[in-house]
Amino acid sequence: MFEHVAVLSDIHGVLPALEAVLAEPDVAGADLIVLTGDIASGPQPVEVLDRLAALGDRARWVGGNGERELVEARAGKTSPFEVVNWAAGQLRDDHLARLAALPPTVTLPVAGLGEVLFCHATPRDDEEVVLVDSRMARWAEVFAGLPAEVGTVICGHTHMPFTRLVDRRLVVNPGSIGMPYGGDGAWWALLGPGVQLRRTRYDVDAACARVAAESGFPDAADFADEYLRSRHSDADALAVFGPRDGR
């Protein structure tokens, strides 16, 4: 049973945001750090993967569509997102092997919450969309076949933090470390014995300058300006994602 678990999702290859969260006392002191996908598809993929690998057994990794797309891009399947194609070309063979082997879900016992299932988008699909205002019927479809003992589900993918009940199950989205929608800073969650949605503030101007200077991605400055400054609100994101949840 883990007393305290930090959940970091959707880092998207942004090292300054990741470093700010890893420096948080509650992350440094957590029993476990769970990474729920879309870890490296961004402007600093190698640096982020190496920093996380240094955590060793303190970190559990879950694969998302970002990991799958990096592996696919390296194998010759071009992504519509240029940062994915660029990032795939930066990775070493050991990075690719690790990403290709990541499980789609991990279930762990957490104090106060019982059995917690961690996934990227939904338990059954790495890019399916569910939102804070998704219909109950949609949640029932997405959670069909989930073991009864799983009382909490952690999902990322949409970059907007929320907690809500779904027919007696607690659902938590920790938000995004590197590409937040709805406000700058790095968003994450702390589990045990309850759920805390957390936001780590850092010097965004300095982080944007650092990404632009340190990344070899040609559009790194624009990427940082758009995403680290959170140019997209949660209202914008909900409007875009809404049609993808079956409504």
Image: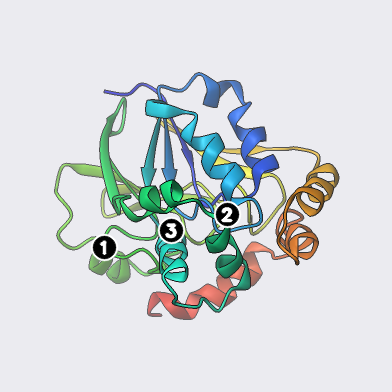
Location of residue 1 by image quarter: top left
Location of residue 42 by image quarter: bottom right
Structural crowding at the residue carrying mark 1, measured as other residues with C-alpha within 10 Å and reported as few (<14), some (14–19) or many (≥20):
some
Q: CA distance from mark 3 to mark 1?
A: 16 Å
Which corner quadrant holds the C terminus? bottom left
For residue 88, say whether it is visible: yes
Identify the residue at horizontal 72%, vertical 50% (top origin): 184
As rendered, which of 227 and 87 lies closer to the eye? 87
Instruction: Say left or right for 106 vs 214.
Output: left
As rendered, which of 74 and 205 lies closer to the eye? 74
Q: Earlier in the sequence, mark 1 or mark 2?
A: 2
Q: CA distance from mark 2 to mark 3?
A: 10 Å
Instruction: Say left or right for 147 vs 211.
Output: left
Instruction: Say left or right for 216 vs 95.
Output: right
| Residue beneath disc 2 | 12
Identify the residue at horizontal 80%, vertical 54% (top origin): 212
Q: Is residue 62 above or below residue 58?
A: below
Helix, strand or loop status at disc 1: loop
Q: Are marks 1 and 2 in contact (CB under 8 Å)?
A: no
Q: Is residue 161 above or below residue 109?
A: below
Tag 3: amino acid: Glu
Tag 1: amino acid: Arg
Helix, strand or loop status at disc 3: helix
| Residue beneath disc 1 | 124
Q: Earlier in the sequence, mark 2 or mark 3?
A: 2
Tag 2: amino acid: His
Q: Earlier in the sequence, mark 3 or mark 1?
A: 3
| Residue beneath disc 3 | 67
